[in-house]
Amino acid sequence: MKRRAYIFGAGVSGLVSGWKLLERGWDVTILEKEQFHGGMSRTWRWTDFLIDVGPHIYHTPDKMLTEFWEREFGDLFITRDFWCKNVKGPNFDQYYDYPLSYESFAQYPQDLKRKIFSELEHLNPDEKAKAHNYKEYVSALVGPTVQDMFFQNYPQKLWGISTEEMTASWAPKRIELRKSVTPFYHGQWNAVGRYGTGCVYDRIYEKIVKLGGNVMLGHGIQGLEHRHNVLTALQLENDQSIILEPDDIVISTMPISFLCRLLGLQSTLAFRGVTSVYLAFDQEYVLPDGLDWLYFDSPELWFHRLSEQKKFSVDCAVPGKTCVTAEIAYSRNDAIDNLGPERLIEGVLDQVCRTGLAQRHDFIDGTVHRQPAVYPLLHKDYQHELAKVQSHLGLFKQLYSLGTTGEFNYADSQILFLKAFDLVDILTDQHSEFSQVKRKQSTAVLNTTVSLNGRLIGEGHRPMIIAEAGLNHNGNLELARQLIDQAADTGCDAIKFQTYQSTSRVSSKIKSVRYAETTLGEQETLLEMFQRLELSYNDHVKLLDYARQRGIEMFSTPFDTSSVDMLESLGVTLYKVASFDLVNVPLLKYIASTKKPMIVSTGMSTLGQIEEALEIIRGEGNGNVILLHCVSSYPAAPEDMNLRAIETLKKSFRIPVGLSDHTLGTMVSQVALSIGANVIERHFTLDRSLEGPDHILSSEPEEMRHLTRCSHLINHVLGDGVKKIEACEYETINAQRKSLYSRIDIPAGEIVTSDAVTIKGPGGGLQPRYIDIVIGRTARRDLKADHPITWEDV
């Protein structure tokens, strides 16, 4: 029986994934709210012109994708180089080459040129590691002058907030300063659609129909019915419904925030939109010769980019006429959003004429298109919010979120194609890791208590707190020393770094590397990031010596056998194994053969895989292993943490078990301590606002200090489990526990009646439980009113 997939959205991701699933023999239905396909990459005819939502260049350094595109769409492409410039000056007549290059800097006025080259010559790489915001980070990359010229007004215009308010994570990881003036996509295959961007997706649409796919245009999703985290039905806007089977797959390319609303989840994730204003002119071309688009950072102009479709392909306009596209970034309910089409056309026409590119008397007509969700807004806490949302969506095993708005990650066509291919591979691969069967619990017994330099880890001993410095040193030795200082000062028991050879750690061809936008070097690949953050042998020597001086244990996670050899030569006393190396048998054996204690993270693993890893370690004669429960998501949502797994691991393997915590805040770590975690490992940073992959989910010093205090108290708080009166309670017993009192004076020899006795505090008399025995007895002596009654009194 055919597998069935329902895809929300007929944009790039929806069409490509649908096409490829159909080729694998699936039954595919694509549901699109609009009456057209193509999404943000569609092309449509307006009067004498073919126009796009915005300029889309097909480009990629990936040879496999290049071959695929040329094979499938070669007749639709025009391959050539593309050029652009930044436009500045009060009269918009100063044109600066972009991408930036030393050749173009050399043509600047003498004083400006001298200043830029001086700043570039004296750049301090350490400043990147210390940057707290976008402006500081870019200044560290290219100097304050270039930052102010090209990376100040433009990003503020595009994102709607100042560069001081943007976190460093928004900044480009590298800015490529080319040797000479070169085309925009220099060194890559690049092309445009002969009949607009959308002609490629028109062909994919035709392929889908030919393969028997069902594309339902004008059928938006209004609701998702579900029960016990299983999607049961789709509610469409036209009051239709589609019943889902439990093994049906749903791929959503709609904005992730809207998908959340359909599932009843509130989310603060938001997008910046783009309003495109199209102006037709009775002239051959508007933009200067040799240029395909222009950037404008002036706050006096609404638009940030001007492009001309006819520049890309003459087939998109009739001779003697042209159409320019002015792109304006906007947010919901801002001034641009509240302007009507006529006002937008008039305003943009006036501004284009101010630039001197066109004359009003040549203007023919205008039209407007709004795309409300284009650029994900990376507000300060977006990673926490995104983790929460992904956690909720992850409960629905049939559901996959894909694409720029679906994954909350802006991407060009090349990346959208690759991600669609990879999702289809996952869904159709019978040998995927998702099909592995869980194995039975193990009865393997290792050491129940592990000694780390004389410090015992296990039941009845104080939990160990590890500050995971990881990559948070940002490649800066001084920052690494400060992390050691703060870890020691906050009371942590150990600090951990990562030891690797970048070329051995990650392939240059893996999926995540292919997903990075490398045109201008603005996004780092994983390989480039690891190269930048790699610690050398001498760095390790200095840091280990410094940690010993500060009296704190320092160890590391090695990612290859050469790194183990290096750490052995430096005399480390224990090792950490990362979650993704739990199934790396050669590395496990190599580390275990050192006979030194091992802390092993268990993210992304089954009990069977953990059992196998422990058997491998034990087979090397190493019985000192600590397991860390871990959820490999960064940051992880508290709802996904499943802390009861700590108890499961303890019962299964009878060895010390702790938590590697990737959540925000220390709440999860404290809960783990309360249920018996023997070790807590948390990412540690000096400042969460620093640039880097892990700072946002890390604890700052004060937060870590609070956690170490908890670790010192937790065993005392938990106690021995015997329910008894504690010594500290006796004073309270005497002060507040109730006893029997005489309500009135009772002479000696009289019978004690119920009216003569009351119950009140403090203690000191008979307990209230004896009231029935006291009533009816004879007073042995005079009892004063409001005095406690004892056995000597009756």
Image: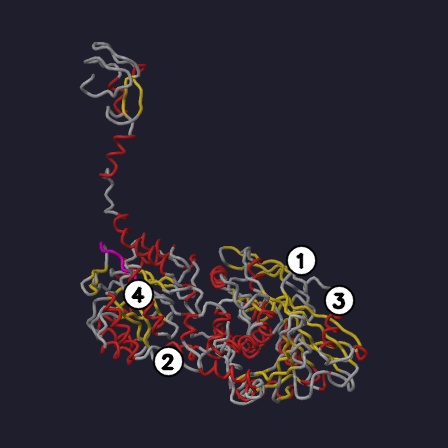
Which of the two marks, 1 or 3, is nearer to us in this view? 3
Q: From what the image shows, is residue 592 above or below residue 332?
A: below
Left or right of 1 in this view: 122: left
Label 1 and label 3: CA atoms lie apart by 36 Å
Q: Is residue 61 left or right of residue 340?
A: left
Numbered disc in front, either 4 or 2: 4
Q: Tell me the kind of residue under disc 3.
A: Arg
Residue at which label 2 appears: 502
* Count of all numbered marks drawn on residues in the image: 4
Task: Identify the secondary structure beneath mark 2.
Answer: helix
Q: Quadrant of residue 331?
A: bottom right
Name the mark nearer the viewer: 1 or 4. 4
Q: Point out residue 232 in the picture as x, y percentages from the top left corner.
A: 55, 58
Highlighted magenta segment, given as a residue range: 460-466
Task: Tell me the element at label 3.
Answer: helix
Circle on res. 343 = 3
Q: Residues within 10 Å of mark 2 (few under 14, many from 20)?
A: many
Three-letter code for the amino acid on which mark 4 is drawn: Asp
